Structures are given as structure tokens and as C-alpha cells.
């Protein structure tokens, strides 16, 4: 989606490779605003990226698939090393 309109926005994923920390990306397969293919290609070579594509879900996947999103993020956070600080 974004790759089809390079004149509209700077590539939002251009600097992903400069970040070495953990990334949790949850994408909606039917997202007509961003497009899951663009994001998948940006994160596919990142060593610390966890990427999930939800179907059916669009750009508002946090609303479309609320329970699944919560479960994915709980699981992802559970894999993060503890900082010893209370949240």
C-alpha cells in the first residue's frame, strides 16, 4: 500500500534496521491504509522482530481483534527480560 504511493509519505520503515531492540508488530491482513506486505518486508530481516498477521483484521485490528491482540502482547511481554522495575 505505502509502496504504491512513495510521493505521499517517507518510508516509515526506513530506519528499522538501525534499531536493535525488540519489536512486536501485529498487522491486519486486510489493512487498506498501510498494507501488511510493506510492514512484513520491513521486519523480515530484523533479528528481534516478532511479527503476526491477523486475518480477518484491518487497520483497526486493536478493535477488530481485541482479545487476540491482548493475548499476543501478553505473550510477547512475557518473553522480554525483566528489568527488575515495577510497572
Image: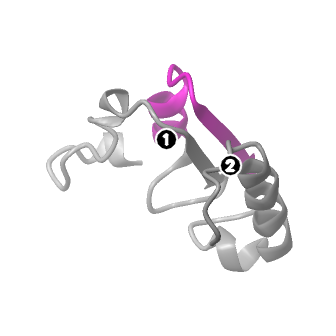
- Judged from the image, the secondary structure of the residue bearing numbered disc 1 is helix
Q: Which residue is mark 2?
A: 82
Badge 1 local density, few (<14 within 10 Å), some, or many (20+)? Answer: some
41 to the left or right of 3:
right
31 to the left or right of 16:
right
Residue 20: assigned label: none
Q: Image quadrant for the C terminus?
A: bottom right
Lower position in the chain sequence, tag 1 or tag 2: 1
18 to the left or right of 44:
left
Give the percent coordinates (x, y) of residue 6.
21, 43
* Residue found farthest to the bottom: 63
Name which residue lies at 85% across and 73% down.
67
* Residue found farthest to the left: 7
Give the percent coordinates (x, y) of residue 43.
51, 32
Can residue 56 be seen from the camera position used here?
no
Label 1 vs label 2: CA separation? 28 Å
In magenta, the rendered stretch is 37-54
Name which residue lies at 78% across and 68% down.
70
Residue 39: assigned label: 1
Q: Is residue 77 above or below residue 57?
A: above
Q: Quadrant of residue 58?
A: bottom right
Name which residue lies at 78% across and 75% down.
66
Amino acid at each position: 500500500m505505502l509502496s504504491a504511493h512513495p510521493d505521499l509519505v517517507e518510508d516509515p520503515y526506513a530506519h528499522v534496521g538501525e534499531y536493535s531492540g525488540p519489536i512486536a508488530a501485529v498487522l491486519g491482513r486486510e489493512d487498506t491504509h498501510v498494507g501488511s506486505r510493506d510492514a512484513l518486508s520491513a521486519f523480515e530481516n530484523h533479528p528481534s522482530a516478532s511479527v503476526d498477521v491477523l486475518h480477518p483484521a484491518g487497520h483497526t485490528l486493536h478493535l477488530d481483534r481485541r482479545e487476540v491482540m491482548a493475548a499476543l502482547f501478553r505473550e510477547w511481554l512475557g518473553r522480554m527480560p525483566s528489568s527488575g522495575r515495577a510497572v
